[in-house]
Amino acid sequence: MLSVHGLTKRYDGPRPRTVFSGIELELAAGEYVAVMGESGSGKSTLLNLVAGLDRADSGSIRLDEVELTTLDDDALTVLRRSRMGFVFQAFHVLPYLSVGQNVGLPLSLLGVDDAERRVSAILDAVGLGDRAASPPRELSGGELQRVAIARALVHGPRLVLADEPTGNLDADTAAQVLRLLREQVKANGAAGILVTHSSIAAATADRTLHLTSDGLRALAPR
């Protein structure tokens, strides 16, 4: 589903540096991997490149046989909307929309006909089936992250990218959210990449990779 080959990213300027080079990554449908690394190693940069939010200096990124590095910005936007889902440390839930309206945003952008049914189904799946009409201010941090997961998955993305999704949560709530994220990625047959500094979070993935300037190295195949 996702194939990354020879990916290199450099930053120019007064102090030019190579963030990483020779990144190789293959993900199949239903596979969920964690990426760890030292602070500043480029974990978020790697996600941005895979998502087409930033441009690599060299290398290939293919999602369902579509080569992302050759697409223009408009085509990348369309691809992100239809085939990717994002979960971040910050919930990015719009306070003036209800829970259901927040979750349904990707469907509105795609012009999906059965949006109400899909929103209802994914909210049930994340345990918020009775909160569709609730304003976000009435939800806890863990519930808001469930909303973010539902929004990331409601349109059936092929690839889910999660960047420190439990950084703002206590340990018990984080464990629940991580379990839910894994379950939903698997249930939807998507491929998932979890970027985290936590070995506990990484243990929820199928395998853990360590990012260095020289590439990705398997840490704990499972």
Image: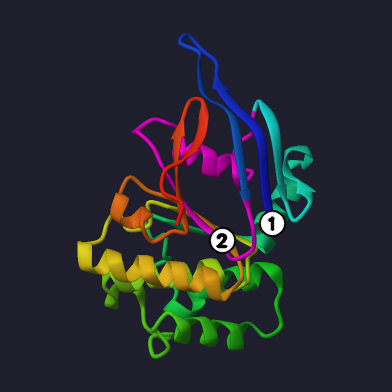
The residue located at (69%, 63%) in the rendering is 82
Identify the secondary structure beneath mark 1. Answer: loop
Q: Is residue 138 left or right of residue 135?
A: left
Q: Which residues are magenta?
A: 27-56
The structure residue drawn at horizontal position 46% and vertical position 73%, both measured from the top left corner, is 183
Between residues 35 and 48, which one lies in front from this camera angle? 35
Q: Does residue 49 appear to the left or right of 134 in the view shown?
A: right
Quick one: 83 or 144, which is closer to the camera? 83
Residue 157, image x and y in percent?
63, 65
Specify whether residue 183 is painted magenta.
no
Which residue in the structure is indicated by mark 2? 31
Q: Is residue 193 above or below residue 30?
A: above
- Chain-order first, disc 1 or disc 2: 1
Question: For residue 55: magenta?
Answer: yes
User: Which element carries disc 2, helix, strand or loop?
Assistant: loop
Per the model, the C-alpha gap separating discs 1 and 2 is 10 Å
